[in-house]
Image (spheres, rainbow, N blue to C red):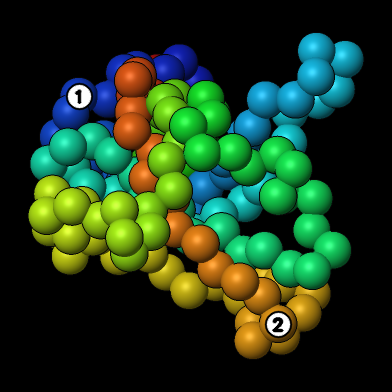
Amino acid sequence: MTDPRSIEMDDEARNEFLGTGGTGVVSFPTDADDAPYSLPVSYGYDEADGDFYLRLAFGPETEKDGVVADHASVSFVVYDQTDEGWQSVVATGRLEEVTEAAIDSDVVQAMRRVHIPLVDVFGRHPRELTFRFFRLSTTDISGRKEARSAD
């Protein structure tokens, strides 16, 4: 029998789980009566500074423009089910658009360390979309994983 309790990941396990990139879900705040606006996204992760880099697609009829704001406070979740059980990381922080004009040397170095997968889940041809990059400067990050024990 297995025990489905969870335990906190240490920094090393969390960084290994996140790797240099993958996919997750970012959630934006909305009005108090509305549910958060959540999107699946590709991310890059820089363990040196604990920041995430997100690639967001914007189409002509997207709602994102009204929700995605520079310096928005967001939450970001990465999760996976493995042979060893489930794992997840939750990060919160501020989203900041990364434009060519605003890229400083630290961001350039971080972008070289990450890998943002290109995942095509769009209802339109990618040429019809505008892709923008954002950095999630984390204020809090924690990871948990399934703790299994045999009886």
Q: Secondary structure at mark 1?
A: loop
Q: Is residue 107 above or below residue 35?
A: below
Eye-nearest disc, 2 or 1: 2
Q: Which residue is mark 1?
A: 10
Q: Secondary structure at mark 2?
A: helix
What amino acid is found at the position of numbered circle 1 in the picture? Asp
Which quarter of the figure is the C terminus placed in? top left
Q: What residue sits 42% from the left and 41% below the top?
A: 96
Q: What residue sits 59% from the left and 38% below the top?
A: 69
Tell me which label, 2 or 1, sits earlier in the chain.
1
How far from the left and from the top, in percent, is residue 67? Answer: 70, 39
Q: Which residue is mark 2?
A: 128
Res. 59 image quadrant: bottom right
Q: What residue sits 43% from the left and 29% below the top?
A: 94
Q: Is residue 123 above or below residue 138?
A: below
Q: Is residue 47 above or below residue 4?
A: below
Question: Is there any visible trace of residue 24 in the rendered image?
Answer: yes
Q: What residue sits 79% from the left and 58% below the top?
A: 62
What amino acid is found at the position of numbered circle 2 in the picture? Glu
